[in-house]
Image (tube, rainbow, N blue to C red):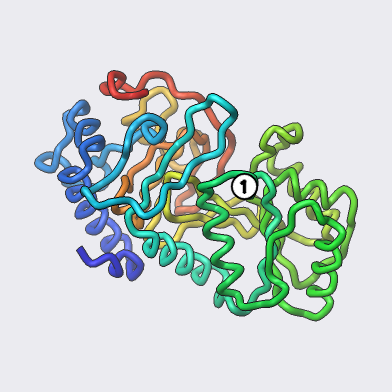
Amino acid sequence: MDINSIFEIRTSSQFNNMALEIFNFQYANNPIYQKFCSYLGKSRSNVTAVEEIPYLPIQFFKSKRVITTNQKPQLVFESSGTTGQLVSKHYVIKPEIYEESYLNTFAHFYGNIKDYCILALLPSYMEREGSSLIYMVKDLIERSENPKSGFYLDNKVELRKALQSLDKSGHKTLLIGVSYALLDVAENHSMNLKNTIIMETGGMKGRRIELVRDELHRILKNSFGLEAIHSEYGMTELLSQAYSKANGIFKCTPWMSVSIRETDDPMSTETYGKIGGINIIDLANIYSCSFIATQDLGKVYKDGSFEVLGRFDHSDVRGCNLMVL
C-alpha cells in the first residue's frame, strides 16, 4: 500500500476507496480489530461500503494492544490520567506518518510553517512522558526555524512580552495552549493583538472549573483583543487533527472524516445536525486502527464540519462486551 497516496486524497470517491482498502488491511492484520468485527458479524466479505465499516470503541486502547502488523513500534503515545487510572496507549509503528499527517494538516489550514513563530503553553502535557501533542508542537517549533519559537511554562510575563513584540512586528504568530493556562494569561495580561492566532487545545485538567466553549472563547477574545479563537481537535489514539478557525466549528483534511452515531446504539448513524457520539475515520492511522468510536458528543453538518459538545460514558458496547476492558 502506498502511504503517500493517503495524503494525496482530494475527492470523496478517493477517500471511500482508500477507507475500504485500509479496512481490509486492518481486518487481516489487526487481531483486536478483527475479533471486534467478528463479534458484530462483520468481515471483508460483507463490508462493501464505508458506511458498513465498524468503529472500534476508543476504550480498547486502554486495555488492548491495538496494532496492525507485527512490526516493532517506534513510539508509544499515552493519554493523560490520574494516578491508578488506565491510560490509552497508541503504538506508533512509523512516526514519519504522524509527522507527514500533522505537517500536511497544518499546511492545509494555515500555510507554510516557516511563515510562523510558534509559541506553546502546554504545562500539563510537558509534565508527563508520551504526549502526542508535545511531539507535534515540538516539531512545529523546530520547523518554524524562528529563534523566538518555543515552550512557555510558568513564565507568563515573558510570554506576554514575546506576544506583544511579535505582534507589533507584524510577524505571524501562533500561540497554542491548554485552556486553563490560556485563561491564566488572559486574566492577568490583557492585550490587543492583530497578527496573532490564539489556539486552544481544550481541557482544564482539573486545574479550573470547566467552561462551555462559548464562555471560554468570549473571555479569551476579550483579553487578547481578537475576533475569533482557534481550536485544535486531536487525541492520543489518532494521527490526524481537525482545526477550528472560529466558533468551535471544526473541519477535517481530505484523509479524515467525522460522523455521528446514536448515543444508545453504537452501530447506528445519526443524521446531520443531530447530537450523538463522534466517530472518526483517520486514514493516516494505518498501522493502528483508522476507525474509532470516541467518547465525545457532537454533531456534524452537511459540509462535513462538526462541533464537539461534551463527553459521555459508554455502556457496554453491543456484541463485544466480552472484549472491552
Task: Establish if 321 lies above or below 185.
Answer: above
The amino acid at mark 1 is Tyr
Task: Residue 151 in the image: state x and y as whole percent.
Answer: 69, 60
Task: Residue 265 in the image: state x and y as whole percent.
Answer: 36, 25
Which residue is at 49% across, 69% downward?
108
Which residue is at 49% across, 55% downward?
241
Which residue is at 54% across, 66% downward?
139
How many callouts does the rendering have?
A: 1
Task: Establish if 296 lies above or below 288.
Answer: above
Where, quadrant-wise, is the N terminus in this rendering? Answer: bottom left
Q: Secondary structure at mark 1?
A: helix
Say whether residue 223 is left or right of residue 116: right
Task: Residue 181 in the image: state x and y as whole percent.
Answer: 75, 47
Residue 38 visible in this rendered orientation of the protein:
yes
Q: Nearer the viewer, residue 145 or 224?
A: 145
Which residue is at 82% across, 59% downward?
224
The residue that disc 1 covers is: 125
Task: Establish if 153 lies above or below 66.
Answer: below
Callout 1: 10 Å neighbours few (<14), some, many (20+)? some
Residue 10 visible in this rendered orientation of the protein:
no
The image quadrant of residue 51 is top left
Task: Residue 94 in the image: state x and y as whole percent.
Answer: 34, 59
Where, quadrant-wise, is the C terminus in this rendering? Answer: top left
Say whether residue 80 is left or right of residue 61: right
Find the residue positioned furthest to the left: 45
Task: Establish if 251 lies above or below 293.
Answer: below
